[in-house]
Amino acid sequence: MSVGAKKENPEAGWFGYERVAPEEKTQRVKSVFSSVAENYDLMNDLMSGGLHRLWKDHFVAKMRPRVGEVILDVAGGTGDIAMRCARKNGDVIVCDINPDMLHEGRVKAMNAGWLSEIAWVTGSAEELPIESASVDLACISFGLRNVTHIDKALAEFFRVLRPGGRFFCMEFSPGVTPALKKIYDLYSFSILPWLGEKVAKDRASYQYLAESIRQFPPQEELATRMAKAGFENVRYENLMGGVVAIHSGWRF
């Protein structure tokens, strides 16, 4: 199925369920991740019951990073995807808009022995500080929904890829199966903010994270927007009934 054409970047004016100016959204999202950076990995384990580790393993397996490829991990945060790719490749660039998240990633990579294999760059997904047609594999995991102008970011991913390059996105999706919706909403809006308050001492940031999922385009719409950005052979795979979706596309 396909969706009709929609206005570009409809999410840009929303910070969760709150109407804001696009420039305000960008700054507030940066503040959210500065607040959660120190507890980011712990909260991922608690929020998913450790399942995020399996999702990320599956994500990297689908990407099939190869020796000699240049890999760009955008919104790479604490380096979970980058370190998985480094085990198979050894030439990975992490780009994140938030210096606090990059700091956590560098420390974790150094402790794991992967610091020299990974380059850490501060930059926005909407204006990647990467040369055009210089990357073989680009990815973003659990980060695209926090980008103010999603269509600009998709165009940037397309720009930096070499012909024959591939793009992968893993994200929480609002398009869950009806059988899961009630329990998923209960978890998202009750348990998730409660965990944020008790563990990270930050209920508001995790309330935003729950709301941001509902503002993210459903699977078919994101696939359509990827195709509009120029990607071909666009596909997606649902995990856990659509709680998580992996999109992929190629630049030919």
Image (cartoon, rainbow, N blue to C red):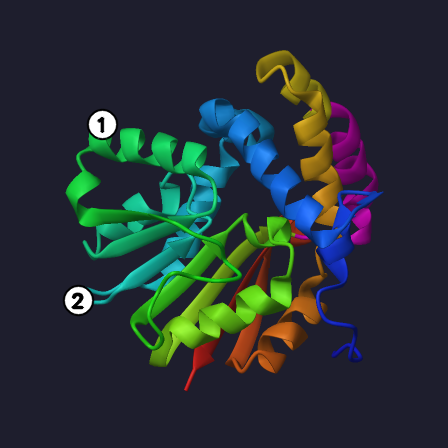
Q: Which residue is mark 1?
A: 111
Question: Which percent across, then down, holds residue 185?
Answer: 80, 38
The magenta segment: 173-191
Question: Which of the two labelled residues, at mark 1 and mark 2, occupies the earlier sequence position?
Answer: 2
List x then y, in percent, for residue 81.
Answer: 37, 47
Q: Quadrant of residue 218?
A: bottom right
Indicate left or right for 141 with 73 as reference.
right
Q: Amino acid at mark 1?
A: Asn
Q: Is residue 214 visible?
A: yes
Magenta: main secondary structure: helix
Using the numbered discs, state the Cα–Cα distance from disc 1 to disc 2 in whole angstroms.
24 Å
In the rendered image, the quadrant that contains the C terminus is bottom left
Q: Residue at x 43, y 52 (%)?
A: 123
Residue 1: numbered disc: none
**Disc 2 residue type (three-letter):** Gly
Q: Quadrant of residue 24?
A: top right
* Residue matched to label 2: 68
Is the residue marked by circle 1 packed among few (<14), some (14-19), or many (20+) residues within 10 Å? Answer: few
Q: 132 or 235: which is nearer to us?
A: 132
